[in-house]
Image: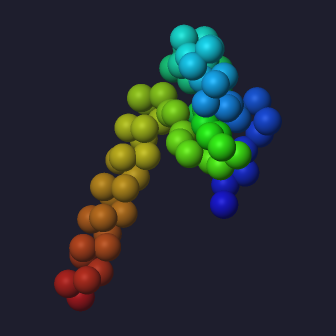
Amino acid sequence: MAAYSQDEIYTATQMVRHFSAIISDVSNGTKKRAVIVKNNKFEAVLLGMHEYERMQEAVEILERIYAKTKRI
């Protein structure tokens, strides 16, 4: 399980009340992500577009590598 810092964790209520500020922090890189907790369970992660696209590229590379190794 990934480790999250206290300043990255928000309750669902906090997200609703401070959505604009939180999304701004994530978008401009002030925060890497925002982890959303609902009913004391981690439910979702909010990422900036740059981080999401970076992760998507990594997944695509891994999928290509996996596809090549399956053919061997």
| Left or right, 23 with reference to 66 | right
Location of residue 14 with respect to 20 vertically, above or below = below
Query: Which corner quadrant of the image does residue 70 belong to?
Result: bottom left
Measuring 20% from the left and 84% from the top, which residue is drawn there? Answer: 71
| Left or right, 61 with reference to 28 | left
Measuring 62% from the left and 47% from the top, which residue is drawn there? Answer: 42
- Where residue 26 appears, as percent x and y from the top left, is 57, 23
Residue furthest out toward the right: 6
Front in this rendered view, residue 4 or 63: 4
Looking at the rendered image, the quarter that the N terminus falls into is bottom right
Location of residue 39 with respect to 60 vertically, above or below = above
- Where residue 35 appears, as percent x and y from the top left, is 62, 38
Query: Which corner quadrant of the image does residue 2 belong to?
Result: bottom right
Query: Which corner quadrant of the image does residue 10 belong to?
Result: top right
- Where residue 14 appears, as percent x and y from the top left, is 66, 22
Measuring 61% from the left and 30% from the top, which residue is drawn there? Answer: 12
Residue furthest out toward the left: 71
Q: Does residue 7 show up?
A: yes
Looking at the rendered image, the quarter that the C terminus falls into is bottom left
Residue furthest out toward the bottom: 72
Q: How is the image coloured?
A: rainbow
Q: Does residue 29 show up?
A: no
Front in this rendered view, residue 15 or 55: 15
Measuring 66% from the left and 43% from the top, which residue is drawn there? Answer: 39
Front in this rendered view, residue 8 or 64: 8
Location of residue 5 with respect to 30 vertically, above or below = below
Front in this rendered view, residue 65 or 56: 56
Q: How many marks?
A: 0
| Left or right, 49 with reference to 6 | left
